[in-house]
Amino acid sequence: MKLSATFCLLLLLVVISGEACAERIKDLAGIRGVRENQLIGYGLVVGLDGSGDQTTQTPFTVQSMISMMQSLGVTLPPSTSLQLKNVAAVMVTTSLPAFAQPGQELDVTVSSMGNAKSLSGGTLLMTPLKGADNQVYAIAQGNILVGGVGAAIAGSKAQINHLSVGRISSGATVERAVPTTLGNGDLIHLELKSSDFSTVSRVVNALNSRFGAETASAINGRVIKVHAPKDADTRVAFIGDLENLEVTPAQMAARVILNARTGSIVMNQAVTLDSCAVSHGNLQVIINTQNSVSQPNALAGGQTEVVSNADIQIKKEPGLVVLVKAGVSLAEVVKSLNSIGASPQDLLAILQAMKASGALHADLEII
């Protein structure tokens, strides 16, 4: 039976992956305290070609514009009603990297929060970016680049990609640094991206073999305590050597990821399958409705009516019971499931039933 494109891709990945390969510690773990911080700000985009917010439906845009003009020394009469078409209220977001210093430039993302049709060609006015502590850490301003294009005329509309989100390269300047300390005293802590006691043990053994006994010790299934030099320059060099040290991670737990919306299924190498029998059949329901006009003759005195004629057909292919043999690898599991001719959508139900019966040895996760 011909394999589907999805199954062929899965089999190719299995052939390529083989056994687990050594990875650098920097790919497996991070250092506690070395992290990014999210920044957010509220601002205004001006210079839009009539594609801004409709001010009657987004009053906060007008209020923001009036407040900004007052801060610039422009006072408007209380009864003034602004009809702004070239202004849009936006949210500005970015991430402040670890060790970022004042003067460093960051890329920012600008997203419309009103009903603006497009941010293309707009300019973001000076916007403070705050952290979770409500302190300003960066200032954003600049011309927005939108990765889409659209046109509308006479009720017709054409659009490619998204027009209400744009990006400004180097659009924010860091104004305040976040204090970052690499541990206390002579200690730093490595934190694995995924908890695994076997991988933690292997990392500890690799560090002690490279830098000497009792250099590292495991705290739990994720955190490793490492003794590092106190001198800043020596500590940086030590961390650089530590991150480039290669370790072979332990095999991950068996897991099957199911996407119920798209029907995609991804299984890792540890998935195994016991012998089981699977019944698979297709049920197809077709409903066709044809509308016809009932026209009485001239002397009948009736009225013209629309009559719906429904045709319902139910087709069911013969059921198929297939014995699926026990598989010891992902390739054999895929071949076994594909042998019954199941589509990815059918496999969602089949795998759940296999898990319930105890034949599938893996954790099912539906996203």
Image (cartoon, grey):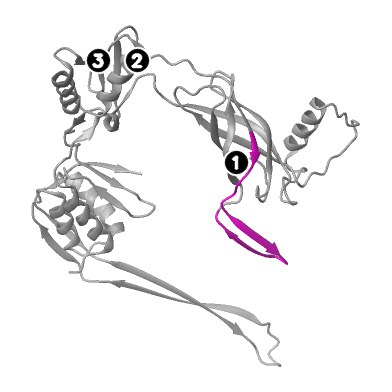
Q: Is residue 138 above or below residue 17?
A: above
Q: Amino acid at mark 2?
A: Asp
Q: Amino acid at mark 3?
A: Val
The CA distance from mark 1 to mark 3 is: 42 Å
Q: Is residue 149 on the magenta stretch?
A: yes
Q: Nearer the viewer, residue 132 or 282?
A: 132
Question: At numbered mark 2, what does the secondary structure look like: helix, strand or loop?
Answer: helix
Where residue 201 appears, as percent x and y from the top left, is 16, 23
Instruction: Give the magenta-colored segment's residue range.
Output: 141-161
Give the residue displayed 55% in from the left and 22% down from the top: 102
Give the residue displayed 31% in from the left and 73% down from the top: 315
Q: Which-is-in-front pick, marks 3 and 2? A: 2
Labels 3 and 2: the sequence-earlier one? 3
Label placed on residue 111: 1
Q: Nearer the viewer, residue 331 or 176?
A: 176
The CA distance from mark 3 to mark 2 is: 17 Å
